[in-house]
Amino acid sequence: MLYESRKLAQGTSFETTMHIFDGDAPGTVFMIVAGIHGREVGSIRAAQKLVRQLKNGDWTIERGTLIVVPIANRPAFKKRIRGKPDLNRTFPRGPSGRTTHEMSRALYKIMRKYKPAWYLDLHEANGLSSASTDVLGQTLITDSGSPAVPAVRRVIKHMNGRVVRRSHRFHIRMHKLKGSSRTAAADRLKAKAVTVETCWSLDMNIRINYQTEVVRSFLREAGLI
């Protein structure tokens, strides 16, 4: 496995690191972004943990290419805020839309360059979806009709076989979100795009473990591990 890191939005207040892991065999390009919302710390820590484990050789990418951006919105992360403006509303909307923020522009440029077949956007949300359909905590979200839906259902089945508490179970949600990186990846790049949402009222280590296991499950689905 080969590894390299690059800077995104270099020289700006949004400068951040992108990590690229290339397997020894050709395969799928898979992109993971966390920290679009700076206060969703569990998702950021999970992405950092994945990068650290791969760099340490705890596990490896066997085929294809994995791209990880652990902190997409560094100024918001430093302040532990969602972000102003909301970065997840600044990606292209529709076939002729454009990015409206320098960081979404940098991320979308990478997306267009590498054309990932899979795109995961790691987030956290209020509430437990087992208790209410009105909240997004413990959900995997994709666009209605997405080719990712069968894999999403398999990952949910896998996760729900592991969770100890019934209230922590994951559920699928299907809708577009205009201006989001997920919907831009799906509509513009035809990627299998999924948003991962853990509930931020849960213990931090539990959230990190859920996020990392969800990611590894999707990497298996895509054939990278």
Image (tube, grey):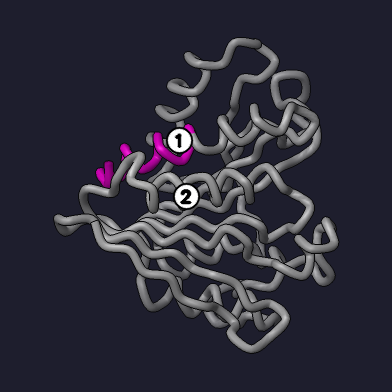
The image quadrant that residue 171 belongs to is top right
Report x, y in % for residue 210: 57, 30
Work out whether mark 1 precedes mark 2 in sequence or the reverse, and give the earlier one.
2
Q: Is residue 61 visible?
A: yes
Report x, y in % for residue 122: 59, 49
Q: Nearer the viewer, residue 104 or 51?
A: 51
SS for callout 1: helix
Report x, y in % for residue 58: 36, 40
- Magenta span has 183? no
Badge 2 local density, few (<14 within 10 Å), some, or many (20+)? Answer: few
Residue at label 1? 152
Q: Amino acid at mark 1?
A: Val
Q: Nearer the viewer, residue 23 or 4?
A: 4
Q: Which residues are magenta?
A: 213-225
Classify the position of the C terminus by image quarter. top left
Q: Work out which residue is located at the far front of the displayed protein and give it.
A: 56
